[in-house]
Amino acid sequence: MNVRESAVFAVRGVVANKLRSGLTMSGILIGVAAVIILISAGTGANRSITDQITALGANTLTITPNSTLAGGRNNQARNGGSAATAVNSGTEIRTSQLTIEDAEALVDPVLAPDVGLVAPVVSPQAITATYSGATHTVTTFTGTSPSYLTINSNTVQAGVPFTDSDYLGRRRAALLGPTVAKDLVGGDGFSIVGQTVQFNGVAFEVIGVLAGKGSQGPQDRDDVVIAPLTAVRDTLASYGNLSSIAAQATASDRVNSAQDQISAILVARHHVTPATADFTIFNPSSILETVNTVTGTFTLLLGAVAGISLFVGGIGVMNIMLVTVTERTREIGIRKAIGAQRTDIVGQFLLEAVFLSVLGGSIGVVIGVLVGSAKIGTFQLVVAPYSIVLAFVVSVAIGLFFGWYPANRAASLRPIDALRYE
Amino acid sequence: MTRPVIELRAVSKVYGSGDTVVRAVDRVDLVVERGDYVAVMGASGSGKSTLMNIIGCLDAPTSGSYLLDGVDVRRLDDRRQATIRNRKIGFIFQSFNLIPRTTALSNVELPLAYAGVRSAERRQRARAALARVGLADREHHKPSQLSGGQQQRVAIARAIATNPVLLLADEPTGALDSHSTDEVLALFDALNASGRTVVVITHEEDVAAHAHRVLRMLDGQVVADERTGAGTGR
């Protein structure tokens, strides 16, 4: 009796009772599909968050000044209860200084060997662009140096980027995000290149339109204007502090050491300690690691919940196999009487259980992959290849595990009892 | 003198214990020689079915020894007993006991499959066995498509396919009409004439009349053992 013949008997056993086999299979099917779909949801969530964080810039670090809330009462005491702080309802907001000299100090091959490009950033708020009657309120207006375009992965799809000579020459040139350009002139917005646009009444020449970056959640990353820091300071922003400093590590595995070097330089310049630092370094890479850990746990949890339904499906297989063994007691008796070995009977029923679960599992994989590749709203599910292998292997294992007991029960029937069974 | 096919020595089968003890088979001695045709008769409850189960290695005796074709089957484990049933005994049951939803040919092939015979040879031997019982043209029929007599002949084909030393039939005509009964009994006669050892358990005199030797059982004991007609026990 070889495996192929046992397989033929097993298939015959499954086909003989189609409705029952189908219902039993549906348990495994739903379990397998649920595992794949829920892991796809977890993977999709992870992919989506990862993409958003990566879009913030590769290997980038952003240094922002801390807005510290100093204890109002202490200040009041020190200030002798001046009228200015008294109206400040007990607290005083002190914004630390982040200067262009800080930014320049970060370009230091000795103290900061892992820091590549550095760009100072000022972000004047409430900027309205006007062009021949059309107006647009710019969400993000950035005054910076040419390095920023590289750090922030900005490319120009029409026109040219601004250069160091534009920066040093305080040229009033602007690069518009696609949203701004389209809003002002319509169409693809490219016709704005070479025109002069008023920003809060200050004329800037549009030298280029940036390539689109798409939306990230509610934030439109194309609703931006980038202009030379020098020109912006001349006109729209004061000569005071920077809004932030953008920096890029020399390589993706140097991001954390670059962060340490920047921190060390700024701590020294600001005469603070790391614990009382008046600035924050935003490191997308480290956040990415945290997010990966969280979504990994989340995915595992979803998979485990789906795994429970797969387990319940396995119990269904066992239940139906026990019924089948009881129903076919007489057949088992006949087979034993004409010389079937224990292993022949075990093999036949075990194969039948595995066949049921594998068939259910295969259909479940197909359904899981179909649903797991779907897009729900803007949320794209991503099928993890390992989940397919896992679900399939688990369904075979379930067939073996839950088929084992019924098959052995069949095999240990005494032929004389089995033959007498009506 | 070849060794006997069946050699029972003081075989007993006891059910229960204490006051409720039942001796289904009580110290039976029996020797069946090769080529003989033996009928075991008795009313229901006489112990003839229990005796058949012991002879067929489906049940173990409580005491006594049993040599089947010279092999002491009491000493064999489950696996070897299954092999013995497969190689040395061909069973024919009252209710045919074919595997349902399976063709006549596959049914006849089954014991050969369990014996490990290769597919091509198995098919050929199964076809030969079906031809022997006159059902060569019914090989692809399922049991439900065959008459009772035909089903029993398929069962006989299955029993002789492995070429066993002993054909063991339990009330083989109990579920058949008189015409089919005649067919089946004629088949037994022919098989015996070609040298096969046949043991038939029955309560019908007509069936027993075909045998060369008739044992009568009562309360677990053999109460009569007579040779009839031309039966000489080769």
Image (spheres, rainbow, N blue to C red):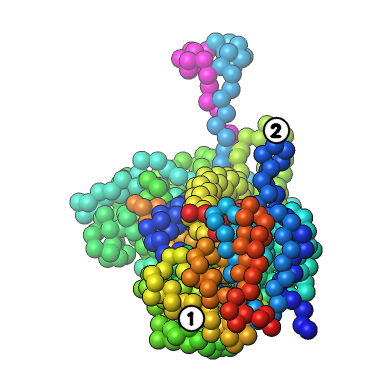
Residue A32, percent from left and from top: 49, 56
Three-letter amino acid code of the residue under disc 2: Ala
Instruction: Inspect the magenta stretch and tell me whether residue A90 lies in it.
Output: yes
On residue A275, the disc is 2
* B113 over A166 or under it: above or below: below
Is residue A340 placed above or below A115 in the rendered structure?
A: below
Q: Is residue A235 left or right of residue A334?
A: left
Q: From the viewer's side, name the closer residue of A334 and A65.
A: A334
Residue B104 lies, in percent from the top left, at 45, 77
Picture quarter containing residue A97? Answer: top right
**Residue at figure coordinates x 77%, y 72% from the top left:** B71
Residue at the farthest left position: A133
Tell me the chain of label 1.
Answer: B
Which picture quadrant has residue B86?
bottom right
Does residue A203 appear to the left or right of A367 in the view shown?
left
> In this figure, which residue is indicated by the disc labeled 1?
B186
Observer-nearest of A338 and B179: B179
Amino acid carrying label 1: it is: Ala
